Amino acid sequence: MKRLFYALVCIGARIAALFSRSRKLYASRFARLDELSHLVTTSLATETSLLLGIGPLNHILRVAPTPERRELGNLLICAPTRAGKGLHATSQILTFPHSH
């Protein structure tokens, strides 16, 4: 049921993006739900991945390697003081395979 709702919201976001005619000086913006669809999962998988956080509809956002792009790259975490940036990095390092 959650997947169906998420798919409908993504379709709505894509249709809304087609009809929006925003003329702003800067083009920066937050990602739409349909642009995050390749990062969304409903459960924590046992495969190698980096946890990004929780998405707008309480889905898990994670980055996993693909056959074309085997290395995951870099991750920038922006948060205020004492928000858990160090704990996030420590947990990623300790749970990532071959990092011990």
Image: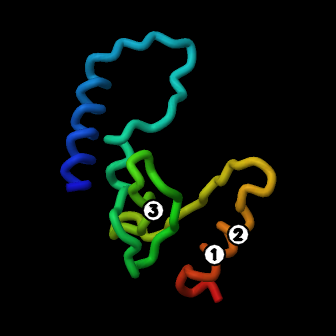
Q: Could you say which quadrant of the image residue 73 lies in?
A: bottom right
**Separation of residues labelled 1 and 2 (CA atoms):** 6 Å
Look at the image and tell me in which quarter the C terminus lies: bottom right
Q: Secondary structure at mark 1?
A: helix
- Seen at 34% across and 54% down, the residue is 38
Percent from the top left, x then y, of residue 70? 43, 70
Depth order, front residue of 41/66: 41
Give yes or no for contact between labels 3 and 1 (Cβ–Cβ under 8 Å). no
Judge whether 81 appears above or below 65 on screen. above
Left or right? Give the position of 29 relative to 89. Answer: left
Percent from the top left, x then y, of residue 75? 60, 57
**Outermost residue toward the front?**
1
Judge whether 28 appears above or below 38 on screen. above
Percent from the top left, x then y, of residue 18? 27, 22
**Outermost residue toward the right?**
81
- Which residue is labeled 1 in the image? 91
Depth order, front residue of 89/4: 4
Labelled disc at residue 87:
2
Labelled disc at residue 62:
3
Q: Secondary structure at mark 2?
A: helix
Give yes or no for contact between labels 1 and 2 (Cβ–Cβ under 8 Å). yes
- Seen at 50% across and 35% down, the residue is 30
Three-letter amino acid code at the position of disc 1 = Ser
- Seen at 35% across and 65% down, the residue is 68
Three-letter amino acid code at the position of disc 3 = Arg
